[in-house]
């Protein structure tokens, strides 16, 4: 609770400083704009009718920067509120709404700076209207998918998940949810790389497995091992369990549970690994594979 209060104090001081800098920025920008306008009037009078562009651009920049500052302040308030309530999923929905509103406001400010209303832009020709309509349909689909992913708590930042989709060949992708953005869902893999999945794909054609997590931040990760059925499945399972117990004891980890997942045409075993080593599962998988290899050949003797 004390650290949360300290964070609030730091954020408050940060934004007081940011507001002071913004005021100075506005003053400097207005002075520069006036200097440019009066210079043009005095030395290039033929361009005087176009000086209003400088004024309009100046006010547009000020409005954009001001809108961005308000957006960042609101995001900080939402983040602090989620930390206080320990509710990350609902805060992501609010952040998503704020992003949409900010981008919509930014587009409106830019269009207004050029003297174009959004209605005129959308109605500016049949071909242009069709192109903009199709683009808007795709964007709105992604935004609504993002809202559904966040509000339904399907994708919660910080959760460890496995995603599979025929879109990328039905390959299991293991990672940690970073955030649900307007157009994409960001998932960090074991190598620290950020993978961006389109929200509509995540919502409509993806199988999501949310791994069982524990209060200490660890999780239970399922590994699957496929072996030929010419060795007794129960003997292989028993031997593999004993080998894994010894190997995992060496590295200070809990013994994974081993069970027969399916039979025919091959024996498929599921190994439930309890781990908090998100970025070291490749080594654990090697240990599991070697254990089953030894168990398999030992069962065939």
Image: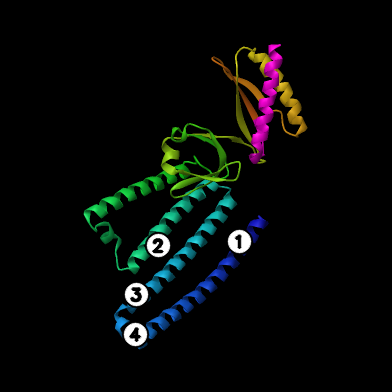
Q: Which corner quadrant of the image does residue 239 belong to?
A: top right
Up-down relation of residue 91 to residue 7 (above or below)? above
Name the front one of labels 2 and 1. 2
Q: Nearer the viewer, residue 180 or 41?
A: 41
Residue 248: percent from left, percent from top: 73, 30
**Disc 4: which residue:** 44
Residue 256: percent from left, percent from top: 68, 28
- Examine the structure image and report whether residue 139 is included in the region drawn in magenta: no
3D distance between C-alphas at marks 1 and 3: 41 Å
| Res 256 seen here | no
3D distance between C-alphas at marks 1 and 4: 52 Å
Query: Marks 1 and 2: in contact by CB < 8 Å?
Result: no
Q: In terms of secondary structure, what is the magenta stretch mainly? A: helix
Number of the label disc, if any, that sits on residue 8: 1
Tag 4 secondary structure: loop
Number of the label disc, if any, that sits on residue 106: 2
Looking at the figure, which quarter contains the C terminus? top right
Range of the magenta residues? 273-301
């Amino acid at each position: 609770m004390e650290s949360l209060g300290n964070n609030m104090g730091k954020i408050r001081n940060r934004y007081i400083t940011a507001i002071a800098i913004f005021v100075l920025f506005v003053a400097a920008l207005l002075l520069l704009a006036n200097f440019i306008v009066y210079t043009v009037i005095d030395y290039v009078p033929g361009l005087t009718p176009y000086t209003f562009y400088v004024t309009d651009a100046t006010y547009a920049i000020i409005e954009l920067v001001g809108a961005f500052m308000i957006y960042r302040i609101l995001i900080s308030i939402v983040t602090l509120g989620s930390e206080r309530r320990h509710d990350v999923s609902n805060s992501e929905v609010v952040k998503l709404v704020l992003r949409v509103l900010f981008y919509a406001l930014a587009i409106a400010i830019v269009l207004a700076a050029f003297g174009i209303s959004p209605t005129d832009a959308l109605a500016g020709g049949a071909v242009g209207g069709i192109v903009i309509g199709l683009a808007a349909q795709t964007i709105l689909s992604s935004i609504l998918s993002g809202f559904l992913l966040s509000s339904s708590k399907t994708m919660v930042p910080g959760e460890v998940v496995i995603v599979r989709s025929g879109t990328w060949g039905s390959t299991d992708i293991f990672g940690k949810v970073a955030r649900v953005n307007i157009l994409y869902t960001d998932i960090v893999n074991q190598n620290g790389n950020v993978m961006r999945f389109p929200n509509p794909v995540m919502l409509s054609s993806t199988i999501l497995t949310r791994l069982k997590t524990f209060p200490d931040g660890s999780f239970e990760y399922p590994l699957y091992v496929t072996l030929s059925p010419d060795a007794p499945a129960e003997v292989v399972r028993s031997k593999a369990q004993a080998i894994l117990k010894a190997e995992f004891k060496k590295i200070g980890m809990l013994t994974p549970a081993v069970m027969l997942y399916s039979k025919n045409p091959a024996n498929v075993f599921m190994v439930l690994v309890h781990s908090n080593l998100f970025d070291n599962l490749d080594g654990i998988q090697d240990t599991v594979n070697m254990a089953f290899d030894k168990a398999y050949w030992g069962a065939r003797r």
